[in-house]
Image: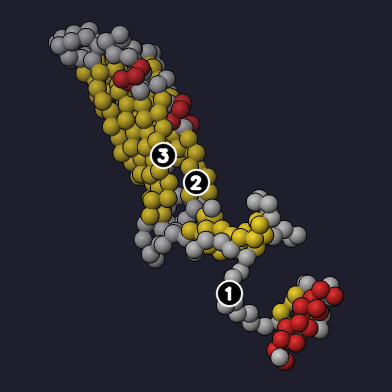
Amino acid sequence: MKKLYSILFVVIGLSLSAQIGVKTNAPKARLDVNGDTNFRGKLAVMNVSDNNKLFEGNNDQVLVSQGEGLPPLWKTLRIPEYEANKFYLIFNNSFSDKTGVTFTSSEESTNGSSRSTSFTKNVAYSSLNRFKKIASLSQPITIYSTQSKTYFQFETVVQAAFPVNDNPDISIDYACGIFVDDKLVNLRQRNIKASSATSTFITHNQIGIAENLSKGQHTVSVACSRLKSYNTNVNLGIGINVASNIDSFITQSSLKVDVYEVPQVFNTILN
């Protein structure tokens, strides 16, 4: 009976007083408990999006504050499980381009005669003569950790409007580079040669890596150049056709970017 009276007094007190304090003489809320709280039954909050019904949440959900003056919400909290000092795939995307770049015989790069000094890691894009960027492959990426490995896979088709090959050989040297923030991180040089058929084309594949880029946003880009021509003055196309035996669908370029990081920032995801 004493317990029943105590409960009645508390209920009456809550209804009569604006604020009730437990183990505190200065309550800061309608019910202010200064100490541990145990729940052996239900814990429900008002769901304002469903006619203010009381909602007890689902299994494994947590209460999340919406800010001052608003009731909390039940949310599903997903925290990825990461092992210390191991790399995880954080970013993955692919980009494509059908515009490409073309070069006439008068657009040969002067870097072609000094390749060993011109094509060094981290050389600035602005210092490379007559390199052209493949427009839609210039894209932003974000790095979140100080330990990272960023992999690049670039693929395109290169075509020259060659006649049938003769003696001496007809060919063109060219180069394509992958850049991060306009700094060279990978470069591949190749030669396309005339064959027994006109308008030769070849597939160009290139893989590069950049380690421990600084945290924050970076811009990835691809640029190519015509280096030197041998016994020919025909047009060269990289990522675009320069003859009608193939089209822009076949010659389109692609760039795949994968960023692996040792996680240092954990962004929880709330549903």
Q: Position of residue 20 (x, y in %)?
A: 79, 78
Q: In this view, does 217 lie to the left or right of 192?
A: right
**Marks 2 and 3 close (CB-CB < 8 Å):** no
Residue under label 1, please give it: 41
* Quadrant of res 160: top left
Whether residue 143 is visible to the viewer of this picture, yes or no, is: yes
SS at mark 3?
strand
Depth order, front residue of 124/29? 29
SS at mark 1?
loop
3D distance between C-alphas at marks 3 and 1: 48 Å
Spot the residue most to the bottom.
2
- Residue type for callout 2: Thr
Say how the picture is coloured: secondary structure
Q: Is residue 186 left or right of residue 194?
A: right
Q: Position of residue 261 (x, y in %)?
A: 41, 54
Q: In this view, does 41 lie to the left or right of 160?
A: right
3D distance between C-alphas at marks 2 and 3: 12 Å
Whether residue 133 is visible to the viewer of this picture, yes or no, is: no
Residue drawn at point x = 64 percent, y = 60 percent: 54
3D distance between C-alphas at marks 2 and 1: 46 Å
Residue under label 3, please give it: 93
Residue density around tag 1, few if under 14, some if 14–19, many if 20 or more, within 10 Å: few
Query: Along the polypeptide, which appears first: circle 3 or circle 1?
Result: 1
Query: Along the polypeptide, which appears first: circle 2 or circle 3?
Result: 3
In the rendered image of this protein, does residue 15 appear above or below residue 52? below
Query: Along the polypeptide, which appears first: circle 2 or circle 1?
Result: 1
Residue drawn at point x = 29 percent, y = 13 percent: 246
Residue under label 2, please give it: 142
Depth order, front residue of 105/68? 68
Residue drawn at point x = 49 percent, y = 46 percent: 142
Residue drawn at point x = 36 percent, y = 26 percent: 253
Instruction: Tell me the mark number nearer the camera, choosing from 3 and 1.
Output: 1
